[in-house]
Image: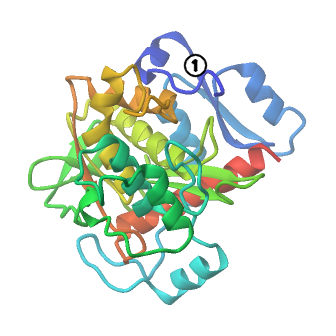
């Protein structure tokens, strides 16, 4: 894990400056002049500036490049329709990443539903298929293409729901859409191109709304997987909310695994010193610990909402686009 990865933004305000590079060898926000100077020294028409807060620095970087704009074919928030043709073409060219973190062992062929089934077999309390069925038996039959196993009762499934925006809320210099219960709406997503293979590139996206100044596309830190992107996207969204004093946040994600991990399994992991029931270590433990610590903060309440991916839901599609941009940034950073 690269360190440092995240710090309290409020603490940073008081102890350090932020150097924004809008045009240089590599655009971004840097924590020291030495890092900034590496990007701008000798670079023709470099654009950079010092700020007291990270938000101001990121606004400077984003303000000096074309604003992020959703696809023209994206549907309004709260409506559903078939994914646009252009979206389907892109999915054909870039195969949808498959989850690789089947616990307690890795299996690159498991998709999220199967990952949920495997995890819930360990962490949940489902009725077993038979007295002799084990997790290894189930996974082996899955690998052999035997679909006769009914895992419906083993997978905690969440129905897809689009959070309807009912009003706008002003928080500091920013406006946010809120739902009927007053929760600020944000969409998060992770992306990993080449998931599970050498040279994989992962990132995450956080989407507050059309052309919103706080929309973010970031490369992951640490393990390069889709799940890491999902977790770090949620961390980033919550840190942003905490920094602004937002008290209620609704995170919409297309990861059933993330929601189940936080709402069903993490309490048991903590009781067992971050181990599974079979005594295997929890993967991505550093990220899960940070996310759990943020959720223990009494100044914010987080509501988790599941949305199905690639179904024409604007917020999800835009978060996915940002996440793919984050993957591209990871590739550029590590090339």
Q: Position of residue 252 (x, y in %)?
A: 31, 55
Colouring chosen for the image of the structure = rainbow
Of residues 192 and 333, the one drawn nearer to the viewer in this rendering? 192
Q: Position of residue 334 (x, y in %)?
A: 78, 43
- In the displayed orientation, state which residue is furthest to the front: 132
How packed mark 1 is, by other alpha carbons closer than 10 Å (few <14, some 14-19, many 20 or more), is some
Quarter holding residue 164? bottom left
Look at the image and tell me in which quarter the N terminus lies.
top right
Q: Residue at coordinates 31% horizontally, 64% vertically from top-left?
A: 307
Q: Position of residue 302 (x, y in %)?
A: 23, 39
Of residues 304 and 53, the one drawn nearer to the viewer in this rendering? 304
Q: Residue at coordinates 34% horizontally, 72% vertically from top-left?
A: 313
Residue 232 in the image: above or below residue 101: above
Q: Please name the residue that numbered disc 1 is placed on.
A: 17
Residue 64 in sight here: no
Quarter holding residue 254? bottom left
Q: Residue at coordinates 26% horizontally, 56% vertically from top-left?
A: 156
Which element type, helix, strand or loop, lies under badge 1?
loop
Of residues 318 and 201, the one drawn nearer to the viewer in this rendering? 201
Residue 160 in the image: above or below residue 118: below
Left or right of 195, for residue 286: left
- In the displayed orientation, state which residue is furthest to the left: 181
Q: Position of residue 145 (x, y in %)?
A: 52, 74
Residue 150 in sight here: yes
Left or right of 125, for residue 51: right
Of residues 319 and 69, the one drawn nearer to the viewer in this rendering? 319
Residue 33 in the image: above or below residue 187: above
């Amino acid at each position: 894990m690269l360190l440092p990865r995240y710090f309290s933004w409020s603490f940073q305000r008081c102890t350090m400056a932020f150097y924004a590079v809008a045009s240089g060898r590599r655009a971004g926000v840097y924590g020291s002049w030495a890092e900034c100077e590496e990007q701008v020294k000798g670079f023709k028409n470099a654009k950079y500036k010092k700020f007291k807060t990270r938000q101001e620095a990121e606004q400077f970087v984003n303000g000096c490049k074309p604003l992020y704009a959703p696809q023209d074919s994206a549907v309004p928030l709260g409506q559903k329709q078939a994914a646009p043709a252009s979206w389907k073409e892109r999915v054909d060219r870039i195969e949808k990443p498959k989850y690789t973190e089947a616990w307690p062992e890795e299996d690159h062929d498991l998709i999220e539903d199967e990952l949920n089934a495997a995890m819930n077999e360990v962490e949940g309390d489902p009725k077993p298929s038979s007295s002799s069925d084990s997790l290894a038996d189930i996974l082996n039959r899955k690998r052999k293409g035997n679909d006769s196993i009914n895992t419906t009762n083993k997978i905690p499934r969440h129905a897809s729901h689009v959070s309807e925006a009912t009003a706008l809320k002003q928080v500091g210099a920013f406006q946010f859409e809120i739902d009927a219960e007053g929760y600020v709406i944000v969409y998060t997503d992770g992306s990993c191109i080449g998931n599970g293979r050498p040279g994989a590139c992962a990132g995450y996206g956080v989407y507050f709304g059309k052309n919103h100044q706080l929309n973010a596309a970031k490369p992951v830190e640490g393990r390069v997987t889709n799940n890491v992107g999902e977790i770090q996207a949620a961390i980033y969204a919550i840190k942003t909310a905490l920094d602004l004093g937002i008290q209620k946040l609704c995170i919409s994600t297309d990861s059933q695994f993330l929601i189940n991990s936080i709402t069903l399994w993490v309490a048991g992991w903590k009781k067992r010193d971050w181990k599974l029931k079979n005594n295997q270590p929890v993967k991505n433990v550093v990220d899960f610990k940070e996310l759990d610590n943020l959720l223990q903060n009494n100044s914010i309440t987080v509501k988790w909402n599941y949305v199905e991916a690639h179904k024409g839901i604007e917020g999800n599609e835009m978060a996915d686009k940002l996440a793919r941009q984050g993957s591209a940034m990871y590739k550029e950073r590590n090339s």
